[in-house]
Image: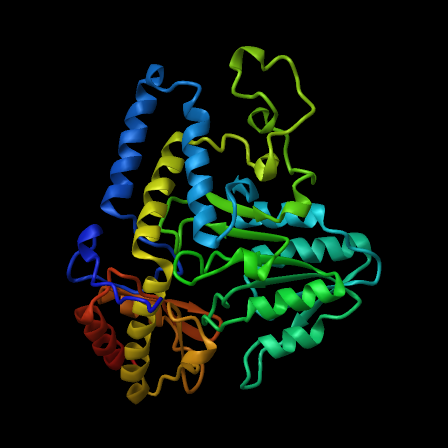
């Protein structure tokens, strides 16, 4: 199906016309209806007699199913987590790593998908192999070359958090299966804006924080767990993850059995009545827009920004090598000191990560925002 360009959705957000917010990779704004859902949930907590035992299960199960649809997985494969690091720690606890084996990461990868592997390497006398930047053919060929019979785990994003450079995860997944390596993905900077197919990639674990491209609240995310790991070891042992936990009167009849699928990996208090309600509302909107449609719309927007930034001396990687929702603009030299702060004083909001100025729009941006970005950049350089 050919993607459809989505018209500007600014009316769904509380973004004044004089604000040009190109910083979704830092933190997305919340839609009006997500805020309203959270406010209503807070009011319910003020009257706890309105919260019944089934509420501990119904909304989390709805969120689990919606996220599964987003990545072409099953609800049984999804756990509810508070953060990327929680999900990565779960993966590290359940993947075999032996002395002398390799754990593969990228240069300048987001630290939540690095620190656990460094700790595990030190514990198991393994080694972290960091794939450097460089070359005109993107990350994928160098990643595939690094994966061999000594590789225990490959830990990657879908696109790099500093500049959006893409990785062919289907090719990486095939290579990992060929050598028996585990594949752990951090999808925080892509889920909701870049199509991902868990059935095609077949990772062992995939984590995603919800406050960026999933446009949800902070401190709530999701963990995909491949079926072969469903009997694994959770980070914590909470009551709701056990069999028959819906029977509140019988909770003192302690169970050794878990709920089915990946639910054993859920964080404690995953039923969070406020955040979970907000996440469900946001996920429904993402699915209504369609991730492929969102990607096509944002790709056209970042292409326009890249073209208009070029006369200012700012360079972007080839569109075929980066995710369409991400634009990393490079400078002839170092990034000018204090540039994001100077832009922020003019109500233009971007980030600097590494040596890139990260411009990450969403469906709330319009042509006036792009004009403002280019005008303010021109005056600041």
Residue 252 versus residue 354: which sits nearer the camera? 252
- Where residue 91 appears, as percent x and y from the top left, is 65, 49
Q: Is residue 59 left or right of residue 223?
A: left
Residue placed at 32% from the left, 78% from the top?
303
Q: Quadrant of residue 243?
A: top right
Residue furthest out toward the front: 1
284 up-or-down from 268: above or below: below
Q: Is residue 305 left or right of residue 137?
A: left
- Where residue 57 appears, as percent x and y from the top left, is 46, 28
Tell me the colour scheme of the image.
Answer: rainbow
- Where residue 41 appears, as percent x and y from the top left, is 31, 30
Residue placed at 39% from the left, 30% from the top?
273
Residue 41 versus residue 55: which sits nearer the camera? 55
Q: Is residue 368 left or right of residue 49?
A: left
Give the quarter of the figure containing the C terminus: bottom left
318 up-or-down from 270: above or below: below
Q: How many marks?
A: 0
Residue furthest out toward the top: 249
Residue 115 versus residue 2: which sits nearer the camera? 2
Residue placed at 28% from the left, 64% from the top?
344
- Where residue 296 appears, as percent x and y from the top left, is 33, 69
Q: Quadrant of residue 378?
A: bottom left
Q: Is residue 156 left or right of residue 372?
A: right
Residue placed at 53% from the left, 16% from the top?
247
Give the quarter of the figure containing the N terminus: bottom left
Residue 54 appears in the picture as rendered: yes
Residue 265 appears in the picture as rendered: no
């Amino acid at each position: 199906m050919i993607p459809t360009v989505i018209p500007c959705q600014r009316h769904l957000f509380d973004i004044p016309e004089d604000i040009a917010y190109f910083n979704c990779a830092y933190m997305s704004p919340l839609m009006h209806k997500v805020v309203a859902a959270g406010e209503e949930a807070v009011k319910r907590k003020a009257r706890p007699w309105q919260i019944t035992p089934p509420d501990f299960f119904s909304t989390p199960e709805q969120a689990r199913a919606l996220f599964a649809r987003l990545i072409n997985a099953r609800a049984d494969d999804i756990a509810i987590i508070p953060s990327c690091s929680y999900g990565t720690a779960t993966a590290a606890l359940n993947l075999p790593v032996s002395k002398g084996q390799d754990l593969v990461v990228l240069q300048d990868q987001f630290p939540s998908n690095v620190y656990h592997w460094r700790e595990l390497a030190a514990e198991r006398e393994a080694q972290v192999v960091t794939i450097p930047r460089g070359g005109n053919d993107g990350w994928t060929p160098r990643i595939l070359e690094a994966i061999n019979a000594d590789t225990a785990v490959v830990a990657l994003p879908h696109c790099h958090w500093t500049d959006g450079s893409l990785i062919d995860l289907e090719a990486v997944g095939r290579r990992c299966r060929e050598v028996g390596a585990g594949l752990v993905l951090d999808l925080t900077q892509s889920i909701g804006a870049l199509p991902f197919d868990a059935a095609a990639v077949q990772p062992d674990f995939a984590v995603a924080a919800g406050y960026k491209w999933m446009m949800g609240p902070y401190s709530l995310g999701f963990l995909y767990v491949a079926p072969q790991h469903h009997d694994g070891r959770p980070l914590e042992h909470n009551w709701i993850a056990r069999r028959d936990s819906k029977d509140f009167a019988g909770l003192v009849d302690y169970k050794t059995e878990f709920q089915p699928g990946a639910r054993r990996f859920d964080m404690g208090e995953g039923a969070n009545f406020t955040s979970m309600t907000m996440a469900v509302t946001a996920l429904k909107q993402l699915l209504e827009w369609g991730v492929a449609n969102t990607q096509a719309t944002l790709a056209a927007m970042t292409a326009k920004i890249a073209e208009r930034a070029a006369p200012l001396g700012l360079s972007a990687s080839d569109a075929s090598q980066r995710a369409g929702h991400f634009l990393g603009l490079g400078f002839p030299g170092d990034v000018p000191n204090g540039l994001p702060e100077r832009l922020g004083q003019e109500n233009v909001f971007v980030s600097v990560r590494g040596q890139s100025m990260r411009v990450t729009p969403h469906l709330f941006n319009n042509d006036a925002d792009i004009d403002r970005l280019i005008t303010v950049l021109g005056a600041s350089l």
